Amino acid sequence: MTPSILIVDDETSFRSVVLDLLQDNGWVAAGAASGEEALSLLNKGRYDIVFSDLRMPGIDGLTLLKEIKKKDPMIEVIMVTSHTSVSSAIEALRLGAYDYLIKPLEDIEQVLALVKRVSDKFSLEHEKAKLLEDLKVKNHELEESNLKVIQYSMDISALYAAEKEILAGLDLSEVYERSVASLSKLVGLRPAALWVLSGSGKNLLPEAQSGFETMDWPDWIVPVPQPLPKPTVEIQHALIEALKAKVSLESALFHPVYSHRKLLGFLGIFDSKKDPFTKRETDILSRLCSSVSLAIENARLYEKVKALAIRDGLTGLYNRRHFEEVLNTEVIRAVRHKHPVSLIFLDVDYFKNYNDLQGHMMGDEALKEIANLLMKRARVTDIVCRYGGEEFVIILPYTDKANARMVAEEIRAHVEAHPFSNREQQPGGAVTVSLGISECPTDGESGSELLKRADEALYRAKGAGRNKVC
């Protein structure tokens, strides 16, 4: 069965390129310039796969997805989004989208790979339906054939359940654990393990296992040839042989986990006997790897979205909400373990004057430059945050007020000396800051007390003529 494809995108050039690619490769494809046109085409004819842009005038991608799933849940929808709409893409997956692509595409072949994967899924479902129909007609045939069909049907159901279980996880470690647990269950509770390529790409790291009583994880790390070439049969075979050497069981079966032609890692199943693995187990491992790759990508994107939620959009520093959580934690720790923690509260002097004279865009640039100055001075253990407007805060664990004052004076001097644009138009001929300091437990044993004392000190610095530390 050859699925028909609909490309929905208000960007004519993108729609045309994808249509030409699909039609040149023998696929039946049509295009729509809007969500409204897409719904009209879907009402007139059958489409099995829909590529839809997330952001379109009128009916947007998410609304179109809901309407398509309401019309026919079997239609697979692939969302096309930009890096700035990753959270919307994740929401689309929750609403039933099969996958998503990020524009601009790194490789247009990604479209063909996705269509092939969905087509294979349709083929499996079609094959299952056909086998079940044959079972009704040929019920008198050999019991062995009957059992094979039943097993195949059960495998598809089990794989579907495992896929849902794995994709439900958004924490990476949870995805890893669910992947090996599901695989082990699917192949008769045999031992299973997952290796993931490290961020540097230099090693395959063992991230999860099921069915091993004891194992020394550091000994299971597999070095990767550097620089890692594009995935080839030879490289894949070499890495698999290196993985097998790490496991002291008689039999091992591995399959690579890829995402958009990029190697993520390897899934493996093991047995203490020398008997080779069956085709059924090989197929299960291969099919499950597709779900694992998607789950890993989703979890990594979710981590990026979470990181963005605690960052200030302008400066990249931690935001006020994160600051309040961390301050309370550090104060509790300081009181419990009887060590100091200091807080610096910083405000840009005459910032309204700077904004009024230079404009808000230049004001934003000045705030970003100040944020960079603070980060350059901060230690690894310090937490630098934008409190709001032109106010910044720095949490200094294991630091008393005297040492915090030295840090604050250094910051004050660096800001005063920094060549901000048109700084000569500011009072005193420079952009300056006033800073207030407080210390736990001397000035209080709660985050709110510490912040209040630092704020009071900051206002004393302002009252004393600004460009001072109090």
Image: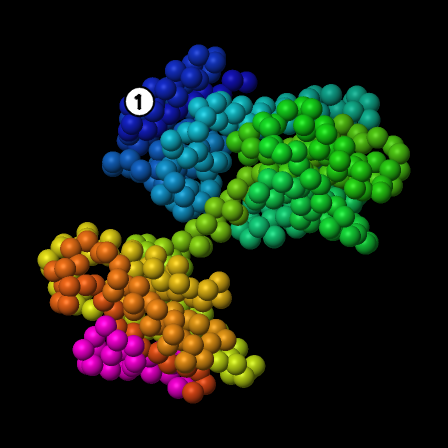
Tell me, yes or no, if residue 230 can be seen here.
yes
Q: Residue drawn 20% across and 81% down?
A: 464
Q: Which residue is mark 1?
A: 13
Task: Specify the principal SS of the magenta part.
Answer: helix
Instruction: Give residue 413's quadrant in the image.
Output: bottom left
Decide: is 62 above or below 445: above
Q: Quadrant of the N terminus?
A: top right
Q: Quadrant of residue 256?
A: top right
User: How many numbered circles are shown?
Assistant: 1
**As drawn, 352 above or below 264:** below
**Residue 460: horizontal and vertical position, in percent?**
24, 82
Q: Is residue 396 left or right of residue 149?
A: left
Three-letter code, disc 1: Ser
Q: Is residue 136 visible?
A: no
Relative placement, left or right, of 97 versus 194 is: left
- Where residue 92 sits, quadrant-wise, is top left
Mark 1 Cα within 10 Å, few/some/many (few <14, many 20+)? few
The magenta stretch is 443-470
Q: Which residue is at 19% across, 63% downward?
A: 430
Horizontal side of residue 28 vs 215, given as left or right: left
- Please check the rendered image and state whether residue 396 is part of the magenta-colored stretch, yes or no: no
Judge whether residue 461 is colored magenta: yes
Q: Secondary structure at mark 1?
A: helix
Picture coordinates of residue 33, whole percent (x, y): 28, 26
